[in-house]
Image: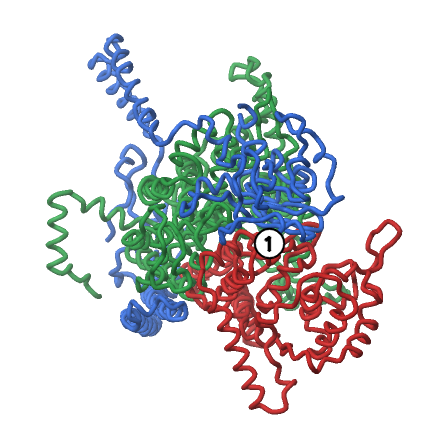
Chain colours: A blue, B green, C red
Amino acid sequence: MTENNTNDNNEAGEPERVVGTPKADEPVVSDATAAPEAGEHAGPYAASETHARPEETQRRGEKIASVWFVLAFLGGLGFLVSYFLFPPDAIGAPQIAQYSNMLLGGSLTLSMFGIGAGMTAWARQVMPHYEVHSPYDELPSSEKEKGSFSDFFMRGADESGFTKRPLMRRTLILAMVPLGLAPIVLLRDTGPLPGGQLKHTTWEPGRRMVVEGTDRAIRAEDFENDPNAMISALPATEHGHHLSLNEQAKTVILLIKIPEGDWQERMKEEVEGTDGATRLNWTHNGIVAYSKICTHVGCPAALYESTTHRILCPCHQSTFDAANAAEVVFGPAHRALPQLPISVDDEGYLIATGDFTAPPGPTFWDYAKD
Amino acid sequence: MSKTTQAPKALRGVGNFIDDRFHLAKTGEKNLRKVFPNHWSFMLGEIALYSFIILLLTGVFLTLWFKPSMMEIVYDGSYERLQGVMMSEAYASTLHITFDVRGGLLIRQIHHWAALIFVAALVVHALRVFFTGAFRKPREINWLIGVAIFALAMVEGLFGYSLPDDLPSGMGVRILQGVMLALPLVGPYVSMFLFGGEFPGEDIISRLYMLHILLIPALLLGLIVAHFMILWHQKHTQYPGTGRTDKTVVGTPMFPAFAVKAGGFFFFTFAVIAGLSAFVQINPIHLFGPFTPTSITSGLQPDWYMGFMEGSLRIFPNWFDLTIFGYALPTAVLVPGLVVPGLIFGGLAAWPFIEQWITGDKRAHNVADRPRNAPVRTGVGAAGVTFYGVLWLAGSNDIISETFSIELYVSTYIFRVLAIVGPILAFFIAKRVCLGLQRRDREMLEHGYESGTIQQLPSGEFIEVHKPNSDGMVDILESKPTITSTALADDADTDDKGVENPEARKGSGKLRRALARWYTKDNVSFDDVEAHSGHHLHHSSHEEEKEAAH
Amino acid sequence: MKWITARRRHPLAGYVVVILALALFGVGYAALAPTAEQAQAQTLAADAPSQENVDDVDIANGEDIFNQTCATCHNYDGSGTYDENGEILRGPDIRGVGAAAVNFQVSTGRMPSMDPDAQMPRKPMAMTEEELADLIAYYNAQIRTGGPDIPYDVPGEAPERSSFEDEASYEAALEEYENEYDSYLEGADDTQMGMQLYLTNCAHCHGWSGGGGALTDGRWAPEIHDATPRQIYEAMVSGPGAMPIFSDGAIEPEEKQELISYIKTLQAEPDAGGIFDLQRVGQVAEGLIAWVVGLALIIACAIWITAKQRAHD
C-alpha cells in the first residue's frame, strides 16, 4: 500500500491521511471499467486513482513507442553522418552550408521528435492514467509553532547582545557603509568623464570631405550640377590614416544639393555665435552639409527624399527638412540636425570651414552649454 | 496477483550509498509522489525552462569560438563574399562559427530561435498565470520572481543580439546608448562609463559579453531555480473540477507518469526549435555586413521582445520635450525608454498587491479562477495585452505601412491613438465577454447544455433539446466564486466595537471603496441557482420519452 | 464526411483545425515565397536584348511612339505640361533628364503611366526592345538637351526567347549575356567599397538586401531584386521619383560597379541558414514565425501530451 504523502511541517495540522483515500465529503473519480478488481492492484498508487490501459492498448503503445525510438536512433545516426559528410573547408560556400545545416538540423529534429513522441506514446498508452489526490500544504504554521519560534529567536537575539548593546551594533553598521560604496567606486575607471568630448568633432577649417567607401575627395563640381544629389561623406584623413569608428560616428555628414529657390525661411537666419553668418552662407552653390546622426537616439538619419527635401531616420522616423535648416518636421527627435559650414578650397574641393553648429548625435541634457 | 519487482542490485547499491549520506528515502518518495495537474496550460512555463536549458547548452558551444573583441581586422576566412572587408573580431569570429565550424551555423540558429521562443513562452506563461489568478496568495513572491525573470530575459536577449557586431545589432547598441545619453544629469557619464568612452569605443562588446554569458545567466539561473523550488513547495494551482479544492490537488504523479511526459516534452521543445533552425534562416549576420555607425538599413527592427520599446520610441511625439534654463529634457526618449517599460513591468509586479488591497482577500487560493469569473481582472489583463501589442506593432510601423500601403505618418498617428483607445476598448470588450460567458454558464447550470437537437412540439413550436450536464461540468460551473470586497462590507466603515473606522474616511479609503465597487459590480450571481432546475430540462429527450410512454 | 462529423465534437477537434490551418499557412507561404535562385532567374528572365546595334534603329518609328505614348503628358517637344504657377500638370520637362532616365523608366515598365500622380510600381515593359531603341534614338536626336547616357557597358536585360528564331541562337545569346553579367559582377574586387557605398547611401531606403522600404506620404522605395545592373546604374544617375542623384562625379563608374556587384551578389547568394529565408524581411518575420509556428507547435505537443483520452472523458 502507499506511504502517506503529507508534508513534514504538517504535523500540527490534520491527522495523516493515506493518499487516495477520500475524505468524507469528497467524491472520488473512478472509472469502473478500467479499475482492476480489488486485491489485484500492484501499482504505487491507489487502485481507484489508477486507470490501467487494456492490455491490447498497452501492446499497441509499446509498438508505437518503439517505432518512434528506432526513428530517433536513425535520426541520431543521421546527425553523426551529416557531420562528417562535408569537410570543414566545404561549408564556407553558402549553398553547401545550407545543405549541411538542413541535414544536421533535420536529423537532429527527427531524433528529438522521435524520442519525444515515443515517450508520449509510452506515457499515454502503456502507463496507466493516474488521477492522484494529494493535499496542498497547510500554509501558515500553527500559532504555537510561530510563538515558539519567535520566543526562541528573541531570546537568542537578546542573549547575543545585539539588541542590548547599541554601541557595538551601530559601529558594526558603520563599518559596513564604506564597503558598500567600494564596488561603485571601483567602477569609476570603466571610462573617462565626458568633459567636452561629446560636443566637439574633428571637423576643422580646411578639412576636405571624402565619399564614404571610396575615400575620394569630393569636388564641388562633381556635385553642384546635379539637380538633386546626395552622398554620405566623412572628413578626409592624412594618407593611410584610418578614421576610427568613434570619429566616424561623430563626423559623418550628408551632403545634399538643394535646387535654387527651394530654400526655406530658417536658412536665412543668423547662426548663433557667428558674426552675422546665415545658414545659407554656410552652403556652397546649393550644397548643404548636415550631421548624419539623428538627434533622437543616434541612428544614421540618411533617408533623403529629393522631392520633399525630407531627411528621414529609418529607425524611429524622425523627419528633418533639409531645405529648412534640418528642422524637425515629424517624429520624436528633440532638435534639428547640426549643420556643418562648408566652402571650397583653391583646387575646387569641398572643405569644412569649422565644426558643427551644435553637438552631433543623440541629445543629452547639457548639449547646448559650452 | 503480480508481485512488485525487487529493485535491481545496482540501483539498491546507489540508493543506499546516497541514503547513508543524506537520509533521503522519505523525502525522495514524497517528491516522486508530487502531483501535477494535467492541463496543457501548466506546461507553458516548462517551454521556457527547456528553452533556457537549450540556450545554456548552445551558448556554451558558441563561446568556444566567439571572440568578444572589437579589434578591427581584415576578414580572410572561408566565406568568400566578405573576404578583404574590415570588421571587428567579434563579427569575424561569428562568421567563423557560421562557415568554418561544422554545425556552428545550426547551433547559432538554435540559440537564436530558442531565445525568441524562451521569451515568448515566458509571456504566454505569465498570461496564463495572470488570467487564472494563479498569482494570488500564497504565490505572490513567485509572481514577482517571474516578472524579474521576464525583465532580465529581455536584457539578456538584447545583449546577446548585440554581440555579433553586425549592422542591426550595432544599431541596437546605438539606440541603447542614445536612450542612456538622454538621462538628465547622469546620461553622459553613464554612457561614457559603460562604453569606456564615446560610442562605439572598444570595450562595449567584451562588457556585454561578460554580462550576457556570466552575470545575467547566473541571475536568471538563480531566479529560475528559486521559482521552481517555490513552485515545488507550494504545488501548482489547478482548474476547478470534481474533487479539486483549495486543500486537495488532483493530477498526474511525478513518478512514473509526469516524469516521462515532461521528459518527452523537453524533446518536443528541442525538436521544434531544431526544426526551425534547420530550415528557417534567422539573423543572417553574414548577409547584413559588419556594423559601422554610419550605415543603416530600412526595416531595421530589434528581436520581437524589444519591439514594444522600439514601438514606443517611434510613436511617442516630441511635443512634451522641455528645455529648462537651456538644459534639454528629451521626454520623447525618456518616456518611451524608461516610463513605458516601468509601467509595464511595474504594473505586472504590483497587480497582485493592488488586487489584494481592493478585495481585502487574504485567503490562500489553490484553485485557479476561470478568466470569465474575474471579469475586471480579465479586462485589465486584456487592456495590458492590447497596450503591449499596440506598441509592439508600432515597432514595425514602417514594414506595416509599406506592406499595407498606409502612409508612414498616418500609421504613426493611428498607433498613437490606438495606444490610448485600444486598451480602454479592450477592457470593456473583455469584461462584457466575461459577463456574457457567465450568463451562459448560469443558463447551462440551470437548464443543461444545448444538445444541437431540434424537436418539434405537438403544438408546432420548435425547441432545442437541452441535456443535463455531466457531473464534472456541474462541479466546474458551481465553483464560480462570488467576487466581494471587504471594503464594501456593511461594517467596513466601523471597527468591531462599532466605532467609526478613521481609515475608511481618508482618501485612500474612499479610493479603495471606489475601486472595490468597480471591481465587484456587474457580476452574474449564481447564488440562487440549483443545477438543472430550469424548465427547459422538462423538454429534454428522456423526459419526452417518458411523456410519450404515458 | 461522416468521419469528420463524428469527430468534430472531439475535445481535440478545435486544436486539430488550428494546426491544420497553420500548416496550410506555412505550406502556402513556402510555395509562394521566392527563393534566391528564383529571384535570380526572374532577374535574368525580365531582361531582354537592347544592345547598341544603333544601325538598325528607326527614328521615325520612335517619333510615332513618342507622340502617341509620351507627348500627352510630356508635350511634343518634351517640355512637359505645367500650369500657370509652374506646377506640373501631367508630366515634367524631360529634355534634360537624359537617355538613361528614359531607358530606366520605360524598361522597368514605370512609363508610360496611366496615373501621373501615383508612384508607379515595376511592371513588364509596355513596348518591345526594338520600339524602346527607336524611341531612345528619337529622344536623343530631337528632344534631349543634356543628362546622362545609357550605360551600355553595364549588363541590361537578358535576351528573350521570343526575339530569336531558333533555340540555338537564343541559347548562344543567353550564354553570352550571362558571361557578360558574371564578368561585370566579378570585375568588382573591392567588397569593402561596394558594401560601404551601398550601406551608407542606398540601404536606408532599399534595405540591406534590396527589399525596399517605406518613405513618407505613402511612397515607398521599391525592391530592387528584379532590377538589372544597368537599371540600378541608370536609377543612380537619373534619380527617379524621390531618389536623389548619385552622378558619375560623386561615384565613378568603376565604383558604381563595386556597389552594384555588392548588392547583386548578395541577392543571388543562397541562404545558408535554410530554404526559408522569410523573404529576408528580418526580425519582424522571425518574431512572427517564433510565435505562430515555433511556440504554436510546442503548445500543440503539450496539448497532445496532456489531452484527455476518450476512455476517461
Whether B341 is drawn above or below A160: the answer is below
Mark 1 residue type: Cys
Q: Residues within 10 Å of mark 1 (few under 14, many from 20)?
A: many
Task: Please indicate whether residue B216 sits to the left or right of residue B347 in the image.
Answer: left
Instruction: Classify C71 as above or below B86.
Output: below
Q: Nearer the viewer, residue B331 or B228?
A: B331
The structure residue drawn at horizontal position 52% and vertical position 54%, both measured from the top left corner, is C199
Instruction: Residue at 41%, 56% (x, y): give it.
Output: B85
Give residue A31's position: percent from left, percent from top: 40, 61
Q: What element carries label 1?
A: helix
- Residue most extreme to the right: C84
Where residue B460 sits: x, y (%)?
Answer: 77, 66
Measuring 46% from the left and 37% from the top, which residue is drawn there? B136
Compared to residue B212, the image places residue B197 above or below, namely above
In the image, residue A244 lies at what x, y percent?
A: 42, 43
The residue that label 1 is drawn on is: C205
Residue C217 visible at all: yes
